[in-house]
Image (tube, grey):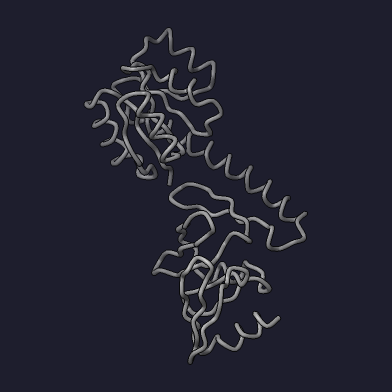
Protein backbone atom coordinates (compact mmCIF):
# COMPACT_ATOMS: atom_id res chain seq x y z
CA UNK A 1 0.00 0.00 0.00
CA UNK A 2 1.00 3.63 -0.61
CA UNK A 3 -0.02 6.30 1.88
CA UNK A 4 -0.97 9.62 0.28
CA UNK A 5 -2.46 13.07 0.82
CA UNK A 6 -4.09 15.54 -1.58
CA UNK A 7 -3.31 19.27 -1.42
CA UNK A 8 -5.66 21.21 -3.70
CA UNK A 9 -7.94 24.19 -3.10
CA UNK A 10 -10.60 23.19 -5.64
CA UNK A 11 -13.13 20.88 -3.98
CA UNK A 12 -14.42 19.66 -7.34
CA UNK A 13 -10.95 18.45 -8.30
CA UNK A 14 -10.39 16.87 -4.89
CA UNK A 15 -13.65 14.94 -5.10
CA UNK A 16 -12.87 13.76 -8.61
CA UNK A 17 -9.32 12.67 -7.76
CA UNK A 18 -10.49 10.93 -4.59
CA UNK A 19 -13.07 8.97 -6.57
CA UNK A 20 -10.55 7.98 -9.23
CA UNK A 21 -8.05 6.78 -6.63
CA UNK A 22 -10.71 4.68 -4.90
CA UNK A 23 -11.80 3.11 -8.16
CA UNK A 24 -8.57 2.73 -10.15
CA UNK A 25 -5.67 2.98 -7.67
CA UNK A 26 -6.69 0.83 -4.74
CA UNK A 27 -3.07 0.45 -3.63
CA UNK A 28 -3.25 4.10 -2.52
CA UNK A 29 -4.52 4.81 1.01
CA UNK A 30 -5.63 8.43 1.31
CA UNK A 31 -4.68 9.81 4.74
CA UNK A 32 -5.91 13.38 4.43
CA UNK A 33 -6.73 16.46 2.36
CA UNK A 34 -5.62 20.11 2.64
CA UNK A 35 -6.84 23.12 0.64
CA UNK A 36 -3.79 25.40 0.87
CA UNK A 37 -0.03 25.18 1.18
CA UNK A 38 0.15 26.08 4.89
CA UNK A 39 -2.36 23.38 5.84
CA UNK A 40 -0.62 21.03 3.41
CA UNK A 41 2.70 21.47 5.18
CA UNK A 42 1.12 20.57 8.54
CA UNK A 43 -0.56 17.58 6.92
CA UNK A 44 2.70 16.23 5.52
CA UNK A 45 4.63 16.82 8.74
CA UNK A 46 1.92 15.20 10.84
CA UNK A 47 0.97 12.20 8.70
CA UNK A 48 4.28 11.60 6.87
CA UNK A 49 2.71 10.21 3.67
CA UNK A 50 4.76 8.48 1.00
CA UNK A 51 3.01 10.32 -1.84
CA UNK A 52 1.54 13.83 -2.25
CA UNK A 53 -0.86 14.93 -4.99
CA UNK A 54 0.02 18.63 -5.09
CA UNK A 55 -1.83 21.45 -6.82
CA UNK A 56 0.34 24.33 -8.13
CA UNK A 57 -1.84 27.40 -7.86
CA UNK A 58 -3.47 27.81 -4.45
CA UNK A 59 -4.27 30.67 -2.07
CA UNK A 60 -1.74 31.60 0.62
CA UNK A 61 1.18 30.14 -1.34
CA UNK A 62 1.70 27.88 -4.34
CA UNK A 63 2.71 24.25 -4.42
CA UNK A 64 6.25 25.45 -5.13
CA UNK A 65 6.17 27.61 -1.99
CA UNK A 66 5.19 24.54 0.00
CA UNK A 67 8.13 22.51 -1.33
CA UNK A 68 10.57 25.35 -0.69
CA UNK A 69 9.40 25.48 2.93
CA UNK A 70 10.18 21.76 3.39
CA UNK A 71 13.71 21.15 2.05
CA UNK A 72 14.85 17.53 2.23
CA UNK A 73 11.36 16.10 2.66
CA UNK A 74 11.48 12.44 1.60
CA UNK A 75 8.16 12.16 -0.22
CA UNK A 76 7.11 11.49 -3.81
CA UNK A 77 5.20 14.31 -5.50
CA UNK A 78 2.66 14.08 -8.32
CA UNK A 79 1.81 17.63 -9.42
CA UNK A 80 -1.78 18.48 -10.32
CA UNK A 81 -1.72 21.38 -12.77
CA UNK A 82 -3.63 23.32 -15.39
CA UNK A 83 -0.41 24.84 -16.74
CA UNK A 84 0.05 25.24 -20.46
CA UNK A 85 1.87 22.57 -22.44
CA UNK A 86 4.83 24.93 -22.77
CA UNK A 87 5.30 25.16 -18.98
CA UNK A 88 4.99 21.37 -18.64
CA UNK A 89 8.54 21.00 -19.97
CA UNK A 90 9.75 22.30 -16.59
CA UNK A 91 8.38 19.10 -15.00
CA UNK A 92 9.62 16.84 -17.78
CA UNK A 93 13.17 18.16 -17.57
CA UNK A 94 13.20 17.52 -13.81
CA UNK A 95 11.82 13.97 -14.29
CA UNK A 96 8.84 14.77 -12.06
CA UNK A 97 5.36 13.37 -12.52
CA UNK A 98 2.42 15.67 -13.24
CA UNK A 99 -1.25 15.33 -14.10
CA UNK A 100 -3.12 17.87 -16.20
CA UNK A 101 -6.58 18.92 -15.10
CA UNK A 102 -9.01 17.31 -15.69
CA UNK A 103 -7.16 14.16 -14.63
CA UNK A 104 -6.92 11.34 -17.16
CA UNK A 105 -7.45 7.85 -15.68
CA UNK A 106 -4.62 6.14 -17.57
CA UNK A 107 -2.18 8.94 -16.76
CA UNK A 108 -3.17 8.71 -13.09
CA UNK A 109 -2.58 4.95 -13.02
CA UNK A 110 0.80 5.34 -14.74
CA UNK A 111 1.93 8.14 -12.39
CA UNK A 112 0.94 6.15 -9.29
CA UNK A 113 2.75 3.06 -10.61
CA UNK A 114 5.93 5.10 -11.17
CA UNK A 115 5.64 6.55 -7.65
CA UNK A 116 5.22 3.04 -6.25
CA UNK A 117 8.42 1.89 -8.00
CA UNK A 118 10.35 4.84 -6.57
CA UNK A 119 9.01 4.22 -3.07
CA UNK A 120 9.87 0.51 -3.24
CA UNK A 121 13.31 1.42 -4.59
CA UNK A 122 13.97 3.64 -1.57
CA UNK A 123 12.91 0.82 0.76
CA UNK A 124 15.19 -1.61 -1.06
CA UNK A 125 18.18 0.72 -0.64
CA UNK A 126 17.42 1.12 3.07
CA UNK A 127 17.12 -2.65 3.46
CA UNK A 128 20.48 -3.31 1.80
CA UNK A 129 22.11 -0.71 4.04
CA UNK A 130 20.42 -2.30 7.04
CA UNK A 131 21.65 -5.76 6.05
CA UNK A 132 25.26 -4.59 5.91
CA UNK A 133 24.98 -2.67 9.19
CA UNK A 134 23.51 -5.67 11.03
CA UNK A 135 26.16 -7.94 9.55
CA UNK A 136 28.88 -5.77 11.08
CA UNK A 137 27.12 -5.37 14.45
CA UNK A 138 28.15 -8.14 16.85
CA UNK A 139 25.90 -7.05 19.71
CA UNK A 140 22.52 -8.58 18.88
CA UNK A 141 20.60 -6.03 20.94
CA UNK A 142 22.00 -3.20 18.79
CA UNK A 143 20.90 -4.77 15.53
CA UNK A 144 17.98 -3.15 13.71
CA UNK A 145 14.81 -4.57 12.15
CA UNK A 146 12.77 -3.09 9.30
CA UNK A 147 9.01 -3.07 9.97
CA UNK A 148 6.28 -1.77 7.67
CA UNK A 149 3.13 -0.25 9.16
CA UNK A 150 0.42 1.15 6.82
CA UNK A 151 2.91 1.56 4.02
CA UNK A 152 5.53 3.35 6.12
CA UNK A 153 8.85 1.71 6.87
CA UNK A 154 10.26 1.91 10.41
CA UNK A 155 13.80 0.97 11.41
CA UNK A 156 13.78 -0.18 15.03
CA UNK A 157 16.71 -1.30 17.16
CA UNK A 158 16.01 -4.63 18.89
CA UNK A 159 17.01 -3.10 22.23
CA UNK A 160 14.09 -0.65 21.90
CA UNK A 161 11.45 -3.38 21.45
CA UNK A 162 9.85 -4.03 24.84
CA UNK A 163 7.28 -6.69 23.93
CA UNK A 164 5.10 -7.91 21.08
CA UNK A 165 1.40 -8.78 21.35
CA UNK A 166 -0.56 -10.97 18.91
CA UNK A 167 -3.99 -9.60 17.96
CA UNK A 168 -5.83 -11.77 15.43
CA UNK A 169 -4.36 -11.14 11.98
CA UNK A 170 -2.15 -8.36 13.32
CA UNK A 171 0.80 -8.06 15.66
CA UNK A 172 1.43 -5.00 17.87
CA UNK A 173 5.10 -4.19 18.45
CA UNK A 174 5.53 -2.05 21.56
CA UNK A 175 8.77 -0.06 21.45
CA UNK A 176 10.05 2.57 23.85
CA UNK A 177 8.80 5.28 21.45
CA UNK A 178 5.74 3.97 19.63
CA UNK A 179 3.47 1.02 18.84
CA UNK A 180 3.87 -0.43 15.35
CA UNK A 181 1.23 -2.70 13.83
CA UNK A 182 2.25 -5.35 11.31
CA UNK A 183 0.74 -8.37 9.57
CA UNK A 184 3.74 -10.56 10.43
CA UNK A 185 2.74 -13.12 13.05
CA UNK A 186 4.33 -13.64 16.45
CA UNK A 187 6.06 -16.85 15.35
CA UNK A 188 7.94 -14.91 12.67
CA UNK A 189 9.43 -12.61 15.30
CA UNK A 190 10.13 -15.47 17.70
CA UNK A 191 12.17 -17.22 15.00
CA UNK A 192 13.87 -13.99 13.95
CA UNK A 193 14.91 -12.53 17.31
CA UNK A 194 17.82 -13.81 19.46
CA UNK A 195 16.62 -16.24 22.14
CA UNK A 196 19.16 -14.75 24.57
CA UNK A 197 17.11 -11.55 24.69
CA UNK A 198 13.53 -12.40 23.66
CA UNK A 199 11.26 -15.02 25.18
CA UNK A 200 7.80 -16.30 24.23
CA UNK A 201 5.92 -16.43 27.54
CA UNK A 202 2.44 -16.99 26.13
CA UNK A 203 0.86 -17.89 22.78
CA UNK A 204 0.12 -14.17 22.40
CA UNK A 205 3.17 -12.54 24.06
CA UNK A 206 6.85 -12.23 23.19
CA UNK A 207 9.00 -10.02 25.42
CA UNK A 208 12.45 -8.50 25.73
CA UNK A 209 13.92 -9.59 29.09
CA UNK A 210 15.79 -6.30 29.42
CA UNK A 211 12.48 -4.43 29.81
CA UNK A 212 11.14 -6.58 32.65
CA UNK A 213 10.50 -4.72 35.92
CA UNK A 214 9.52 -7.73 38.05
CA UNK A 215 7.83 -11.13 38.01
CA UNK A 216 4.84 -12.07 40.15
CA UNK A 217 4.63 -15.72 41.11
CA UNK A 218 1.52 -17.74 40.52
CA UNK A 219 0.30 -20.84 38.73
CA UNK A 220 1.77 -19.41 35.58
CA UNK A 221 2.78 -16.00 36.77
CA UNK A 222 2.68 -12.40 35.63
CA UNK A 223 5.50 -10.32 34.17
CA UNK A 224 5.36 -6.60 34.89
CA UNK A 225 7.15 -4.60 32.19
CA UNK A 226 8.93 -1.31 32.82
CA UNK A 227 6.14 0.63 31.09
CA UNK A 228 3.61 -0.82 33.55
CA UNK A 229 2.11 -3.46 31.23
CA UNK A 230 1.27 -6.81 32.88
CA UNK A 231 1.81 -9.89 30.71
CA UNK A 232 0.59 -13.36 31.61
CA UNK A 233 2.97 -16.33 31.61
CA UNK A 234 1.40 -19.55 30.35
CA UNK A 235 2.00 -22.66 32.48
CA UNK A 236 3.68 -24.60 29.70
CA UNK A 237 6.13 -21.77 28.97
CA UNK A 238 6.94 -20.88 32.58
CA UNK A 239 9.91 -23.23 32.96
CA UNK A 240 11.70 -21.97 29.83
CA UNK A 241 11.06 -18.37 30.88
CA UNK A 242 12.46 -18.87 34.39
CA UNK A 243 15.57 -20.54 32.99
CA UNK A 244 16.11 -17.63 30.63
CA UNK A 245 15.90 -14.87 33.25
CA UNK A 246 18.05 -16.86 35.69
CA UNK A 247 20.84 -16.87 33.10
Q: Whole-percent x and y of residue 133?
A: 72, 50
Q: Nearer the viewer, residue 137 or 168?
A: 137
Q: Residue furthest left?
A: 12
Q: Nearer the viewer, residue 4 or 174?
A: 174
Residue 118, compared with residue 144, is above or below; it is above
Q: Whole-percent x and y of residue 220?
A: 49, 88
Residue 8, compared with residue 217, is above or below; it is above
User: Which residue is depicted at the point 53% across and 68% down?
Assistant: 226
Q: Quarter of the image holding residue 142?
A: bottom right
Q: Whole-percent x and y of residue 35?
A: 30, 26
- Taking 221 as reference, is 30 left or right? left
The quarter of the image holding the C terminus is bottom right
Q: Residue furthest top?
A: 86
User: Which residue is depicted at the point 56% across and 77% down?
Assistant: 214
- Taking 180 as reference, is 33 left or right? left
Q: Whole-percent x and y of residue 200?
A: 56, 77
User: Which residue is depicted at the point 52% across and 88% down?
Assistant: 217
- Taking 34 as reference, is 75 left or right? right
Q: Nearer the viewer, residue 119 or 173?
A: 173
Amino acid sequence: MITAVIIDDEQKNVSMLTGLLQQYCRQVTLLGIANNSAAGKKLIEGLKPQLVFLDIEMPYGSGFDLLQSMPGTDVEIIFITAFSQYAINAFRYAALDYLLKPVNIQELEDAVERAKEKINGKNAIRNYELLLRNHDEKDASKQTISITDKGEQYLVQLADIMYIIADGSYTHIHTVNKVIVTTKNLKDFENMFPATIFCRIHHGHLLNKNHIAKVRKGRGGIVLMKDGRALEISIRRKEDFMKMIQK
